[in-house]
Image (cartoon, helix red, strand yellow):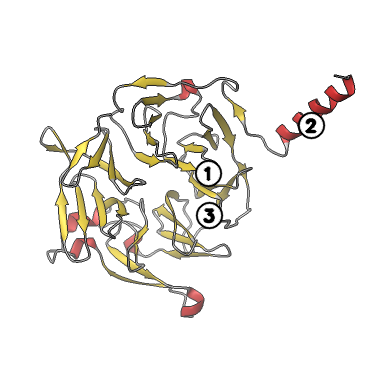
Amino acid sequence: MKLTTQLFFYMLALLTSCNGQTFNKKIESDLFVKGDTVKELGSNIMVIYQDKRNTYWFGSWQTGVYRFDGKTLINYTTKHGLYTDRVDDIKEDNSGNIYFAGMNPNSTISKFDGQSFTHITATPSNDWKLETNDLWIKNSYQAKQKVYRFDGNTLFELTIPKPPKFNNPFEVYSIYKDKKGNIWFGTNPVGVCRYDGKSFEWITEEDVTEFRNEGANGVRSITEDKNGDFWFNTEKRYSIYDSITLKSDQFYTRHESIGSLDGKNTRGLNEYLSIVRDNENNLWFVTYRNGVWKYDGTKIIHYPVQAHSKDITLFSIYKDNKGDLWVGTHENGAYKFNGQTFEKFNP
């Protein structure tokens, strides 16, 4: 190969690698990252995700992430290229790449392409857009109103504007895309924010900011029920409208929520942490210390989640590709619903 040809390809590679970006630090770039084969999950499992290939990913706040393909359980940590051993969010792009975000001060996430990890560092930006294929990812390091938007090339670190009359910074606890394509941000402690691609609208009343008796939980989970009402793991559920059509500054109305559905005003259900809608349109609520509750539109049913006959502390609930339900816990790994009860997952 002539020197001029070699120089051309060298310059082309250099320009491609830069391209205005400061990310893509490849870990073991030409090697397949094997991870550590383990027999069981770590005790702390906070987020669960199943990808397009039906592989499960279990994110921990202490021991990285676990990959289960139906046969083998593999643990990836920082020694294998994961940027941080705390995983708060797991997302997947259209090409099947998996992204992991966790608590770190450098606005960096990890990308796994099936063979190795890449570190992607966010670029501070005001480039607010709402594109169909964008990934919206939580920023978990003392976030101060920040979220990530990844368009496939650049990871943008965006700052959500404060709502009127709120001066203190807030954290983003949850992100949800609704049926109309709007993005919702659940925060602590200023309520929920809807971004429609053009403007931001807030629900900042007491119901979605702080619980009673001075307890602050934040909006950790957002979903829509079969009627299109929104549930924000708060004391009420909300009917949401198009503010332009409604011709009013208040684009919602609120109704009684899970804590009153049994006719007894079961206060303990008001402080649920996570919610999911199953394939039959039932709603499932995870509480911190009081198991899981199912609401079918008429009645509620309680499902204890226990270890050694004692209730355990829960964190999240997830519906997989088949519609099966999983629960993440603080100290007892993951649990799966078998149709009658939640049993501990043992690969």
* Residue extending farthest left: 309
Q: Of residues 6 and 78, which is closer to you in this image? A: 6
Q: Residues within 10 Å of mark 2 (few under 14, many from 20)?
A: few
Which SS class for mark 1? loop
Q: CA distance from mark 1 to mark 3?
A: 23 Å
Task: Determine whether label 1 and label 2 are within 8 Å by CB.
Answer: no
Q: Residue at x 37, y 65 (%)?
A: 205
The label number, if any, that marks residue 160 in the structure image: 3
Q: Residue at x 47, y 39 (%)?
A: 141
Q: Nearer the viewer, mark 1 or mark 3?
A: 1
Residue underneath mark 2? 12
**Image height of 258 relative to 332, above or below:** below
Q: Earlier in the sequence, mark 1 or mark 2?
A: 2
Q: Is residue 287 left or right of residue 232?
A: left
Q: Residue at x 35, y 52 (%)?
A: 221
Residue underneath mark 1? 93
